[in-house]
Image (cartoon, rainbow, N blue to C red):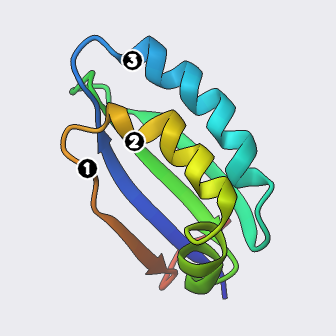
Amino acid sequence: MAVLEAAVLKIGPGQNGAFERSFDQAQLIIASMPGYLSHELQRCIERDDEYLLLVRWESVAAHEEGFRQSPQYQQWKALLHHYYEPFPTVLHYERVFGSE
């Protein structure tokens, strides 16, 4: 069963454009990883400096071990981590109800 990685990303004021351009590059990295299924980045309507990142993985291990321990993660980190204020909490979820 697939798992959903969810992270609320709060970025520094006035960095939306730069963050989105960097994410445009970074999404190619994550999409190339084994165990990756899909992702989406949503911008909050009420809070301009807040985004929601949702990534579907085949397993928690595909994310935590496969991606986070890969050389590609260092590229992802270099592109995105300096925008976060504070660094986000990342949690994993499994479907209980819903449709796709």
Against 7, is 43 above or below? above
Q: Residue at x 42, y 61 (%)?
A: 6
Nearer to us: label 2 or label 3: 2
| CB under 8 Å between discs 2 and 1 | yes
Identify the residue position indicated by label 3 in the image.
16
Q: Position of residue 35 (x, y in %)?
A: 75, 74
Q: Residue at x 74, y 65 (%)?
A: 37
3 or 1: tag closer to the N-terminus: 3
Q: Residues within 10 Å of mark 3 (few under 14, many from 20)?
A: some
- For residue 79, the mark is none
Against 49, is 85 above or below? below
Dot 1 falls on a residue whose secondary structure is loop
Q: CA distance from mark 2 to mark 1?
A: 8 Å
Against 33, is 41 above or below? above
The picture quadrant where one finds residue 14 is top left
Residue type at mark 3: give it.
Answer: Asn
Q: CA distance from mark 2 to mark 3?
A: 14 Å
2 or 1: tag closer to the N-terminus: 2
Q: Position of residue 8 (x, y in %)?
A: 32, 49
Left or right position of 11 against 41: left
Q: Residue at x 57, y 46 (%)?
A: 76
Identify the residue position indicated by label 1 in the image.
87
Q: Compare residues 89 and 53 and report the one nearer the observer.
A: 89
The picture quadrant where one finds residue 84 is top left
Residue type at mark 1: give it.
Answer: Phe
Residue type at mark 2: give it.
Answer: His
The picture quadrant where one finds residue 49 is top left
- For residue 81, the mark is 2
Q: Residue at x 75, y 41 (%)?
A: 28
Q: Residues within 10 Å of mark 2 (few under 14, many from 20)?
A: some
Against 31, is 67 above or below? below
